[in-house]
Amino acid sequence: MITGGLDLGAGAIKGALLEDGQRILATASAPSRGIPVQVARQVLDALGEAANIAPDDIDYLCTTGFGRYTIPERNLQVSDFTSSARGAIFLFPKTRLVVDVGTQASRTMSVSDTGKVLKFKMNEKCAAGAGRFVERCSKYLQVPLEEMGPKALASERPKLISSVCAVLAETEIINNVAEGVPLPDILMGVFLSLAQRAHSLMRYVGIQPEVTLVGGLVRNVGMVKALHDTVGMDLNVAPEAYYAAAIGSAILGHSRLRKLAAAPQGAGG
Amino acid sequence: MSGVVAGVDIGSTTAKCVVLGEGPRILGKSLSVVGVDIVKDAERALEAALADSHLSRSDVSFITGTGYGRYKVYFGQLVVTEISCHARGAHFLFPGTRLVVDIGGQDTKAIRIDEKGEVVDFAMNDKCAAGTGRFLDVCANALGYDVGEIGPLSLQARRAVKVTSTCTVFAESEVTSYVSRGKDPKDILAGLHASIANRTLSLMQRVGVEPEITFTGGVSQNEGMVHALRRRLGAPVNVSPLSQYLGALGAALHGRERLSGGAA
């Protein structure tokens, strides 16, 4: 049984294919630009190619993320909390807290050993706690997004940001540049300010090991280090965790499909 | 010694200075953009207002500093918070004022005052650009307009769109997505002004909405914002061409009180 998971986020559409809800066959992603359905189909094509299967071979497709209702060929949709939690438990079975700093929102949730969400907290109202802040910094500091993390690691004295607003922080950062603060210190300051935001969400939910990072932030070494230093404990990080929500939704799709198959003929919808 | 006093209001975006003679007469004023060197900007603001009054430094008996950069007004004899100054300034122009709404470049305040112009209570948003002049700046930019143009344009809207984002950064994306969906920029602008009016109202409600209401600060010069606020309140709002100078005017008035020995 092959199930697909698609995570339609604000920054990127991520996809995963799983066999029997247990083995990852392929992962793929593309930036969320233009029409979501078209980008999603590109991701599905890339998945099929990587796993060497035809689109028809996908038995069940489960979507998640804020664009989850936009895909007509979906069989099921689940909330991003549920799917991220399930994906995190799959990758790190001892996970008790999941942290996701996305482009437009950051969330954290405590999970049971079966991947059930127990408590959660989200910030979706303000760009200061989200990846969009990093994107803006990348623009006005003229440092490509993917270079920000590696550059920040060279920081010796991170320049902390006092503003709690992404727009007001911009003025502060530009003043810091004018005053000659080294770029790595400015970049690490940006990541630390995001990490502090995430940390307060985590404290609200309750911090207990193991903590697993998922979503956009796991790809940014600067952000991972900032969060590690702020929280002061080991954090689970894996490249596949970028796809945690897609993986989780493929797993949830698989469980649903098995239930449907087990139900007596004609009993279900 | 003359009875001439000056107030210097150093905001996040602009510096304002008012020179006040004896009685209710404003002798001169100035408005300039604040740069990196705030100390110099404060000096320049005073010089410009003195030139406007045809006076020299020695003619001024007392100088008061206020605003976000008030501690950089080194040549002054007194420092007063902008909250007390806006209260005093609004009371001076509109003696019936009980609630002052000040929307500046970087913060928003609602100040409830008594019949003497003393502060009773206030609420402030200075943590975040949402609902401030900066919000309008960013959104005007996203639409390709100068911030001075957007108020009048918003008044020509036919059907205001609903702007749901609070955060300035998210509102900017929302504006861009409305543009790409072919919405009329005027309708988007009306939506933006209405959204700030909503936010301002909730700040006002924290201290109690009581007439008369006087609108001050740089954003009070935006007629679209005045209209949106009046409409949201369903009540009149005092606005004056001098609204932007009320902080500086209030500072000058505080100085005059100090000069005449003690509180009013």
Image (cartoon, rainbow, N blue to C red):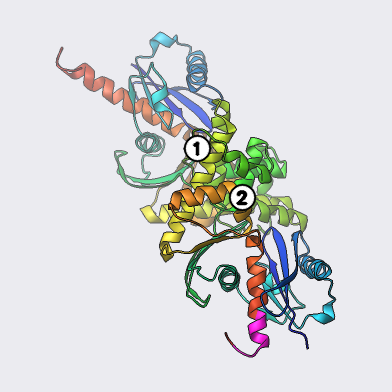
Q: Is residue A14 left or right of residue B239?
A: left
Residue A200 quadrant = bottom left
Q: Does the magenta portion include B260? A: yes
The quadrant of the image that shows the N terminus of chain B is bottom right
Q: Tell me, yes or no, whether the two marked residues, 1 and 2, touch with CB atoms within 8 Å.
A: no
Quadrant in which the C terminus of chain B is drawn: bottom right
Residue A152 in the image: state x and y as whole percent: 66, 48
Instruction: Using the rendered image, report if marks 1 and 2 lie on a common chain.
Output: no
Tell me: A21 left or right of A185: left
Q: Chain of mark 2?
A: B
Can you give x and y, in whole percent of width and height, for residue B162 in the image? 47, 37
The residue drawn where x is 63% and y is 44% is B138
Question: Which residue is at 48% across, 20% downward?
Answer: A40
| Number of marks in the rendered image | 2
Report the magenta stretch's main SS: helix
- The residue range painted magenta reads B255-262
Q: Amino acid at mark 2?
A: Asn
Q: Residues within 10 Å of mark 2 (few under 14, many from 20)?
A: some
Q: From the top left corner, tell me how far across and down residue A2 is, in percent.
A: 37, 17
- Asked if residue B126 is among those painted magenta in the image, a careful observer would answer no
Between residues A36 and A4, which one lies in front from this camera angle?
A36
Dot 1: what SS? loop
- Amino acid carrying mark 1 in the image: Ala
Q: Which mark is residue A238?
A: 1
User: For the view shown, which residue lies furthest in the bottom direction?
Assistant: B261
Residue B89 vs residue B40: left or right? left
Q: Which mark is residue A159?
A: none
Q: Position of residue B176 (x, y in %)?
A: 58, 33
Q: Is residue A99 visible?
A: no
Q: Pick the residue in front: B24 or B243.
A: B24
Label 1 vs label 2: CA separation?
A: 51 Å
Residue B222 circle label: 2
